């Protein structure tokens, strides 16, 4: 069964607003990663948070991880039109030799 | 996307054709991956190569045949595909197998008629 589930599936906001996306997963993990994908392109790694971390920042991105609830959130502050993309969480399960498991993604649309 | 290139970027083929997708990484990584991305579905891992040895198959149909001649190049040979194989095929690499971060190419948009 699918490990990561992003919520919401789609999000539309205005430039300057904040965007929050959530990811829930099922099994214990080593780390959780967020990737961005512009339309029809490859994925770009944004940020990684390890299971013993609770919050991490990178520029306008803030990621939180709650291992007790098996959930993570990605906050993009002061969004720009260029942030329009799909955002995926990927979990690294705590099982030897298991690859990253990606969710279906959240499609973010930022209008100017 | 930088550091991992894929060709062609778009491919249209008939069900009886044979074609190949090519991926090249310029990052000095030891592991490479093929993923399939269909609309409304999560990324599906198809193949993993580590140091040129295939380590995971994930029950992909035999009409998809991977080849990894060296640690920088990865091919996906296609033959007698079905329309449901139409998708975006993404190549990725990482420093080691199942390492923390994967670097993706831009993908090949495949349409099977």
Image: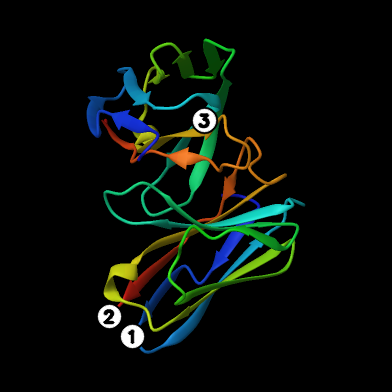
Per the model, the C-alpha gap separating discs 1 and 3 is 37 Å
Q: Is residue A51 above or below residue B87?
A: above
> How busy is the neighbourhood of tag 3: few (under 14 within 10 Å), some, or many (20 plus)?
many
Residue at x 52%, y 10% (from the top left corner): A54
Per the model, the C-alpha gap separating discs 1 and 2 is 5 Å
- Quarter occupied by residue B112: bottom left
Q: Chain of mark 2?
A: B
Identify the secondary structure beneath mark 3: strand
The residue singled out by tag 2 in the image is B113
- Residue B83 lies, in percent from the top left, at 28, 74
> How busy is the neighbourhood of tag 1: few (under 14 within 10 Å), some, or many (20 plus)?
some
Q: Chain of mark 3?
A: A
Contact check, label 1 and label 2, Cβ < 8 Å: yes
The residue singled out by tag 1 in the image is B14
Labels 1 and 2: the sequence-earlier one:
1
Please tell me if label 1 and label 3 are on a single chain.
Answer: no
The residue singled out by tag 3 in the image is A33
Q: Is residue A38 above or below residue B70?
A: above
- Residue B65 lies, in percent from the top left, at 53, 74
Residue at x 32%, y 31% (from the top left corner): A6
Per the model, the C-alpha gap separating discs 3 and 2 is 36 Å
Q: Is residue A35 above or below residue B20?
A: above
Colour scheme shown: rainbow
> How busy is the neighbourhood of tag 2: few (under 14 within 10 Å), some, or many (20 plus)?
some
- Quarter occupied by residue A38: top left
Viewer-closest of A69 and B113: A69
Residue at x 49%, y 57% (from the top left corner): B58
Q: Outermost residue, bottom direction?
A: B16
Contact check, label 1 and label 3, Cβ < 8 Å: no
Identify the secondary structure beneath mark 1: loop
Identify the secondary structure beneath mark 2: loop
- Quarter occupied by residue A86: top left
């Amino acid at each position: 069964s699918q490990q990561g589930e992003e919520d919401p599936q789609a999000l539309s906001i205005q430039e300057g607003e904040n965007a929050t996306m959530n990811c829930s997963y099922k099994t214990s993990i080593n780390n959780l990663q967020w990737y961005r994908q512009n339309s029809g392109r490859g994925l770009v790694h944004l940020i990684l948070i390890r299971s013993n971390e609770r919050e991490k920042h990178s520029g306008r991105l803030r990621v939180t991880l709650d291992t007790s609830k098996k959930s993570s959130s990605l906050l993009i502050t002061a969004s720009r039109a260029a942030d329009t993309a799909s955002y995926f969480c990927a979990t690294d399960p705590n099982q030897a030799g298991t690859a990253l498991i990606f969710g279906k993604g959240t499609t973010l649309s930022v209008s100017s | 996307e930088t550091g991992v290139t894929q060709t062609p970027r778009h491919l249209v083929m008939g069900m009886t054709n044979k074609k190949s997708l090519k991926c090249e990484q310029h990052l000095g990584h030891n592991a490479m991956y093929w993923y399939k991305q269909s609309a409304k579905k999560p990324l599906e891992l198809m193949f993993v190569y580590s140091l040129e040895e295939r380590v995971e198959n994930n029950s992909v149909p035999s009409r998809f045949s991977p080849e990894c001649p060296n640690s920088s190049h990865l091919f996906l040979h296609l033959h007698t595909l079905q329309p449901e194989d139409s998708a975006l095929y993404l190549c990725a690499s990482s420093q080691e197998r199942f390492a923390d971060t994967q670097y993706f190419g831009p993908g090949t948009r495949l349409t099977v008629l």
